[in-house]
Image: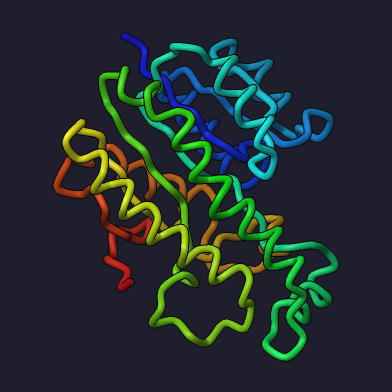
Amino acid sequence: MTLTACITGANRGIGLELSRQYLDAGWDVIATARNLDALDDLTDLAQEHPNLRIEQLDLGDQASVSAFADRLGNQPIDLLINNAGIFGPLPFVENIQKQRFGTVDFQVWADVLAVNTLGTLNVTQALVENVAASSKKLIVTLSSGAGSIGDSDRPAIAYTSSKAALNKAMTIVARTLKDRQIVVAIMCPGYVRTRMGLGGGDVEVEESVSGLRSLISGLTMADSGTFRRYNGDVIPW
């Protein structure tokens, strides 16, 4: 029986590589993108893999989330990977300034929270029955070490607080879904060299995704509610 993964924010970076590696492993993949006119390499991937289904999904839009869930219907999802997220508006330097204490742009903060925290929880809530109907029953949310309360060195208030709130929300989801035998794990891909990171980072996307897949393959109920880096290290809350 073919397994199905649903990966949000899959048109580039980590989401694209997750799609590629799961497709290569024989999975069916539902890959989402906010803008279907900017699919980048995802279009080429679809030409190579007929078992790749591309869907439009904007985490910041309730109607988009509802429509996406309606299109999936009763489709079982063995693995939901909440990958989609934003750091904030470009240009980067101006964005950072809008997230520093003293010059915080509260609309930017609200926009980042709407996608990273509320949007991710909304998608998870909308698709939980699809996950429950599958054989694997896995929900993996990609967060960031920047969301750890112990990490106070990063000045981007909007982004870091959105990830801290996401972490807390997902621990509650994990506890809520425990009786249904649904594993809910929180993972950090590391500081990956992607477009979102403006080419910075100390981990190649292939290495990060390979590590994430290794962790995911070994998930059990004992791992539900845990927060780990792609290499298996436990991250303090």
Q: Position of residue 141 (x, y in %)?
A: 43, 48
Q: How is the rendered protein coloured?
A: rainbow
- Note whether 20 is above or below 115 in the view shown: above
Q: Position of residue 233 (x, y in %)?
A: 28, 65
- Please report the residue visible at 20 percent of the width from the left and 40 percent of the height from the top: 178
- Please report the residue visible at 27 percent of the width from the left and 26 percent of the height from the top: 136
In this rendering, position of residue 116 left or right of residue 37: left
Q: Residue furthest bottom?
A: 102
| The one of 216 and 57 positioned closer to us in this rendering | 57
In this rendering, position of residue 206 left or right of residue 33: left
- Please report the residue visible at 32 percent of the width from the left and 69 percent of the height from the top: 235
Q: Position of residue 130 (x, y in %)?
A: 40, 21
- Note whether 136 is above or below 116 in the view shown: above
- Note whether 97 is above or below 44 in the view shown: below
In this rendering, position of residue 81 left or right of residue 235: right
**Quadrant showing the N terminus:** top left
- Note whether 126 is above or below 197 in the view shown: above
In this rendering, position of residue 59 left or right of residue 20: right
**Quadrant showing the C terminus:** bottom left
- Please report the residue visible at 73 percent of the width from the left and 24 percent of the height from the top: 43
Give the image quarter of residue 76: top left
| The one of 31 and 34 positioned closer to us in this rendering | 34
Give the image quarter of residue 197: bottom right
Give the number of callouts. 0
